[in-house]
Image (cartoon, rainbow, N blue to C red):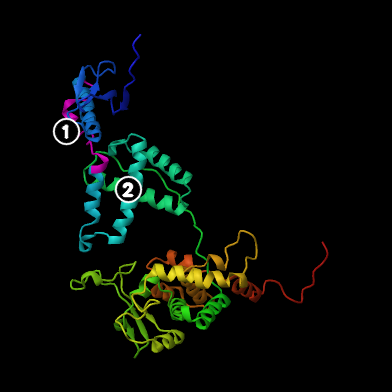
Amino acid sequence: MPKKNHLEQFQCQFFRWPIYQRKNGVWYADGRSNGAGIQRTSLGTKDRQDALANLHRLDRVQAENLGLVPRSTSSTGPRHLSIKAGRKLFDDHTSRPRLVGGTKENTQKRYKSIFDKFNSFLGTKRIVDWNQVTEKTLSDYAEHLTELEYAYKTVFGELNTIKTAFKWLCTEGHLSREPLKLKLRKADCQRAYCYTDAEVAAMIQHCGENDEVTWLQGVIIALSCTGLRISELASLKWSDVRFDDRALTIADESGFADSGNERRSTKSSRTRHIPIHQSFLDVLQSLPRQNNRVFLGPRGGQLKPDTVRNILVREVIEPLTPRFPKAYPGERSFENGRLHSFRHYFCSTCANNAIPERIVMNWLGHADSEMVRHYYHLSDDESRRKMDQLKLIGRSVGRSGV
């Protein structure tokens, strides 16, 4: 008895189609046993993705021929859009000029990474058209990323980006669908470690006593006294420093026409000004002006954030870790500190010294107070001190036995 041939089955909107590829490479659909009422039909292409897109159109046409859908509505029926074509439309939209709402280059790179991963997942589910993407698709993808041990914040951000792209395709008329209604629950994520005063002082002293990392001492003081991101510090120019009124300009040049490849940008896309603390002023006055950049790398070249991070961990964090051990197993401690921890330290110090939140928002470049509250937390020692200041029960009141 001849062996039964098991054809690949593909579910469209109206019918489930067996599809196969002939020896010449052309894809065919078989509508003899699925209720579509047609014989084997060529899909007119050797490319599988194009064949599946054509299959969706065939599915619609046969539904109209059989009276399942009125022909009068065929022009307003679902618009089939391949994953590849839809992604290109969204990429073109996000890469338009910043003046009219386009995104930054770094954002576009992040989107590319997100959709590359999503496309790979869709391939395992045989999803080739945006009309096949549903709330369940995103739920399955969230489970997939979680199994790969991606952080909650990462999964939330990637699904939110996909939802945004899908909504844009719908509102622009590329899809005859409603936006996906899957609700994503935003959760508090683990904060970066916040250095203590003693830890910052130890790092500054350590760098000052070791010739190989003396250059890093100024970087640590600068980050601790400004709350700058390392990318902002690395791009700082002497023209941004105003010694006369002790102020620092963190410039966003994304709207400049003549800056070329040197065009700088901040995360908030806004220029801000920060007063210069005396400790930071001492560092600035001690630096040589060999370059238009304020801070230079260990060999006198451009200061690169990755280089600073690697050297900080290897030459400063690791040697000093025995001095600041974990208080409890599993607790985040000094060994978990990184460059962004100086930003947390700056915010915590501002909070502990009762600096108004609105001022700190301006210094950090945050427009949303919720973002500032992420940093605006008291240290354990300061928290206990504040608690002890409360007069909750009179000191002279005796305690009776229970």
Left or right: where 316 falls relative to 262: right
> Looking at the picture, how far across and down is residue 321, in whole percent?
58, 70
Mark 1 and mark 2: span between their CA atoms?
30 Å
- In this picture, is 358 found above or below 24? below
- In this picture, is 71 found above or below 353? above
Identity of the residue drawn at 23% across and 69% down: 261
Q: Is residue 217 magenta?
A: no
First reached walking from the N terminus: tag 1 or tag 2: 1
**Image quadrant assignment for residue 16:** top left
* Amino acid type, mark 2: Phe
Residue assigned mark 2 = 115
Residue 339 in sight here: no
Q: Is residue 70 magenta?
A: yes
Question: Which residue range is magenta in the image?
Answer: 67-84
Q: Which mark is residue 75?
A: 1
> Looking at the picture, how far across and down is residue 147, in whole percent?
48, 44
